[in-house]
Structures are given as C-alpha cells and as structure tokens.
Amino acid sequence: MAEQAGLIAIGAGLAIGISALAAAIAEKDIGAAAVGAMAEKEELFVKGLIMTVIPETIVLFGFVISFLIIGKM
C-alpha cells in the first residue's frame, strides 16, 4: 500500500511538473513573438499580453489532474 501511495504522489507531481514545463516553453516563444510585434506596432500590446497569459491554463489543467490523481488515494 505504501508503494502505491508513493507512485500516486509521483504521478501527481509529474502532472503538474510537465504541464508547467510545457507552459513555460510556450510562454517563452509567445513572449518573444509578442515583443517583436509590439516593437513594430504598439497597438498590439493587449493582444500580445492576452496571448502570453493563455498557456497558463495548461498549468491549471495539470493542477486539476493532480488533484484527481491524489483523490484516488
């Protein structure tokens, strides 16, 4: 039973960790493109800001999945 609880905890940690890593990579690429676009047209600031925030939902999905995994304990 103890090994099973440990594996569940590792799975929950991986759910958050991998989703956070994916969101960070996406934000890096989107942020670089948004800064380049804003350098040419200042009115693209709001669109760039919104596009930079969207990948954070990936982390929220990972967070919910980790709670669902831990709930199986």
Image (spheres, rainbow, N blue to C red):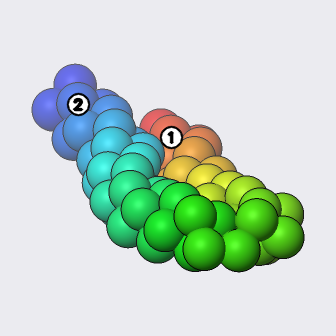
Residue occupying the far left of the picture: 3
Q: Amino acid at mark 2?
A: Gly
Disc on the earlier residue, 2 or 1: 2
Q: Is residue 29 above or below residue 67?
A: below
Residue occupying the far top of the picture: 2
Q: Position of residue 8 (x, y in %)?
A: 32, 42
Crowdedness near tag 1: few (<14), some (14–19) or many (≥20) residues, C-alpha within 10 Å: some
Determine whether, in the image, residue 17 is placed left or right of residue 41: left
Which numbered tag is attached to residue 70?
Answer: 1
Q: Secondary structure at mark 2?
A: helix
Residue 55 in sight here: no
Q: Position of residue 4 (x, y in %)?
A: 23, 39
Q: Which residue is mark 2?
A: 6
Label 1 near label 2: C-beta < 8 Å? no
Q: Amino acid at mark 1?
A: Ile
Q: Is residue 64 above or below residue 57?
A: above
Q: Secondary structure at mark 1?
A: helix
Q: Residue at x 32, y 51 (%)?
A: 21
